[in-house]
Image (spheres, rainbow, N blue to C red):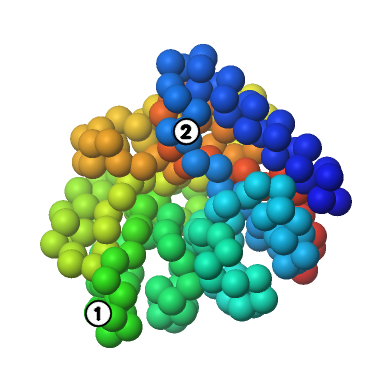
Amino acid sequence: MENLIRENLSEVKGTIQRAAQKSGRRADEIKLVAVSKTHPPEVLRQSLAAGARIFGENKVQEADRKISEIGRDKAAWHLIGHLQTNKARRAVKLFDVIHTLDSVELAERLERICIEEERSQLSVLVQIDLAGEATKNGVKENDLPNLAAFLQTCERLKFDGLMIIPPFYEDAEQVRPFFKRLRELRDEIIPNGELSMGMSHDFETAIEEGATFVRVGTAIFGQRHTQ
């Protein structure tokens, strides 16, 4: 399994390199988040040995088990799934970056918890819902300025950029307008901020549109383990 992960990681990094060159960017501008949700700690250890440095987890409780087994300092840990308010305190303790901030209420809670837990800084990205899908979370585009304005007042939360989970299309070109719009919003709201967009089937297109974080799971680990 480790050899397969190593080969897959190498292939994904090569694709990132080519996509960056195609769009006139440097590959080191793009950070690879290995989406490790549903995969057991042993697979994460193998991917660490193969060169993975950032893991993306969907659920706080699942991440908690893995981090306690693997080690908080062995990798960077990013929350890429929806954060329930009752899991906010644990998330503050576990994660380096939260990609899925989607309301002023959640931001207020995270800021307060950071103060209570004496965490000096927590990097957050705001998840945007551009497609209005009932199954997806994220702040509406019209509500983004209000949330961004609140984040600018925070002492502990560091507003670092935007994130999107667009509709799934087999043809990645159909996703491009969502990536482009996210970039436009980023340029308006937080120039030079991070853009977390692109997954296994469309991350090349996301890179062409300016992604700085790509969240890749299947192309590295294969199909998910069911739980």
- Counting from the top left corner in percent of width and height, residue 124 is at 35, 58
Tell me the mark number nearer the camera, choosing from 2 and 1.
2
- Depicted 83 relative to depicted 47: above or below: below
**Residue at image x 56%, y 48%?**
33
Bin the neighbour count of mark 2 within 10 Å (Cα to Cα): few under 14, some 14-19, many 20 and up: few
Q: Identity of the amino acid at label 2?
A: Asp
Residue picked out by circle 1: 115
- Depicted 148 relative to depicted 40: above or below: above
Q: Tell me the quarter of the image containing the C terminus.
A: bottom right
Residue picked out by circle 2: 28
Q: Considering the numbered disc 2 on the image, is that residue within a helix, a strand or a loop?
A: helix
Left or right relative to 41: residue 79: left
Q: Considering the numbered disc 1 on the image, is that residue within a helix, a strand or a loop?
A: helix
Q: CA distance from mark 2 to mark 1?
A: 33 Å
Foreground of the two, 18 or 124: 18
- Quadrant of residue 7 within the rendered picture: top right
**Residue at image x 25%, y 33%?**
187
